[in-house]
Amino acid sequence: MQITRKLVIGVGTAVVLGTGAGVAAAAGGSDQSEGPDVAITGDALQKASDAALAETGGGKVTGTEVGDEESYYEVEVTRADGSQVDVQLDEGFAVVGSKADSQTSGEGAG
């Protein structure tokens, strides 16, 4: 009776510990995933949008992200011709880089 009880407690503990490790791994506790994108909100959205549009010379903000892998903020701008530019900003909303998306490189084909 005593051995069976210890066995049940030991197995139960192992299951709980194993489940906790699985949850930690699924939650992104390693470098396997970046997690969901988080959009810029509030006053920061207006400041980031203004900085990005100034960098691109206009267009429409079509996406934003806080904590981008390349900078603190990323703002995607779509220009009137349909081309897209990703503008990288630091925490003070200063432009630290920009990159045109390569999807629009097929201009003139036809």
Image (spheres, rainbow, N blue to C red):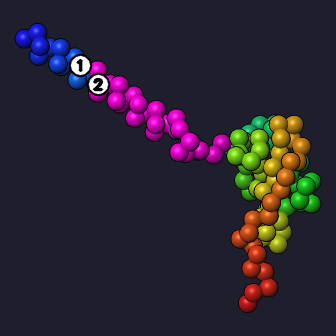
| Residue bearing the label numbered 2 | 14
- CA gap between label 2 and label 1 equals 6 Å
Q: Is residue 25 magenta?
A: yes
Q: Is residue 14 left or right of residue 86?
A: left
Q: Quadrant of the C terminus?
A: bottom right
Judging from the image, what secondary structure is the residue with disc 2 in?
A: helix
Q: Quadrant of the N terminus?
A: top left
Q: Which residue shows up at 83% across the image and 45% down it?
A: 89
Can residue 49 be seen here? The reply is no
- Residue 49 image offset from top left, x and y in percent: 83, 48
Q: Is residue 55 left or right of residue 14?
A: right
Residue at the extreme bottom: 110
Can residue 18 be seen here? The reply is yes
| Residue bearing the label numbered 1 | 10
Q: Which residue shows up at 53% across the image and 45% down it?
A: 32
Judging from the image, what secondary structure is the residue with disc 1 in?
A: helix
